[in-house]
């Protein structure tokens, strides 16, 4: 049973690294979103790609966290917050609060907001949240 779970954990690790690598590729060279600029559909494509990749990366990380939690403790948390607290305890994430905020932004990305709200979302994704994903990727890469 343990071997089967190690295979699943390895697959979850590979998916996390791939998903965060796509976010990283979107972040490289992308200018900050300007709420004053009227973007054409073509100019919005990199931002749309970033938001889609961010959503997938957060979901992929959460799936990995669930697998990793079960691998470490052989139990699953009842709540998302409990899961994050365990990931913070094992130093996989820097802060439970950041991940709660990341999930909130993930939920808000799918709705239409005013340009200033969109700018705030992209500033977070391109700043604090992007950095958090990259740090998690680096830590996960070191897990055997």
Image (cartoon, rainbow, N blue to C red):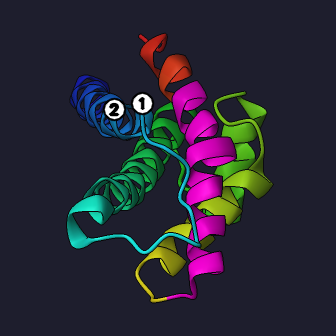
Kind of element beneath mark 1 = loop
68 inside magenta stretch = no
Please tell me whether residue 31 is drawn above or below residue 104 in the rendered image. above
Is residue 78 in sight in this rendering? no
Question: Position of 92 compared to 9: left or right?
Answer: right
Number of other residues with Cα within 10 Å of mark 1, as a class: few under 14, some 14 to 19, many 20 or more: few
| Range covered by the magenta-colored residues | 113-136
Give whichever of 12, 73 is nearer the camera: 12
Which label is found at residue 28? 1
* Percent coordinates x, y for residue 88 in the rendering: 74, 39
Contact between marks 2 and 1 (CB within 8 A): the answer is yes
* The image quarter in which residue 111 lies: bottom left
Give the x, y percent position of residue 92.
Answer: 64, 30
The residue wearing badge 2 is 25
Place of residue 112 in the rendered image (x, y in percent of width and height, measured from the top left): 45, 89
Looking at the figure, which quarter contains the C terminus?
Answer: top left
Q: Is residue 2 visible?
A: yes
Looking at the picture, how far across and down is residue 24, in whole percent? 41, 32
Q: Looking at the magenta stretch, what is its main secondary structure?
A: helix
Between 126 and 90, the one nearer to me in the picture:
126
Q: Residue at x 63, y 55 (%)?
A: 123
Residue at the spot 28% in from the left edge and 55% down from the top edge:
49
Above or below residue 61? Residue 137 is above
Tag 2, which secondary structure? helix
Snapshot quadrant of residue 120: bottom right
Does the magenta run of residues contain 128? yes
- The front one of 91 and 78 is 91
Residue 88, above or below 48 = above
């Amino acid at each position: 049973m343990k071997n089967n779970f190690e295979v699943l954990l390895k697959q979850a690790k590979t998916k996390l690294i791939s998903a965060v690598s796509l976010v990283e590729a979107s972040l490289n060279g992308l200018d900050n979103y300007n709420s004053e600029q009227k973007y054409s559909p073509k100019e919005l494509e990199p931002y749309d790609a970033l938001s889609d990749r961010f959503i997938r990366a957060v979901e992929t990380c959460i799936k990995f966290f669930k697998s990793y939690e079960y691998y470490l403790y052989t139990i699953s948390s009842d709540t998302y917050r409990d899961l994050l607290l365990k990931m913070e305890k094992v130093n996989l994430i820097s802060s439970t609060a950041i991940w709660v905020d990341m999930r909130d932004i993930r939920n808000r990305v799918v709705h239409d907001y005013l340009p200033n709200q969109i700018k705030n979302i992209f500033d977070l994704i391109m700043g604090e949240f992007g950095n958090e994903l990259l740090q998690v990727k680096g830590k996960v890469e070191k897990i055997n």
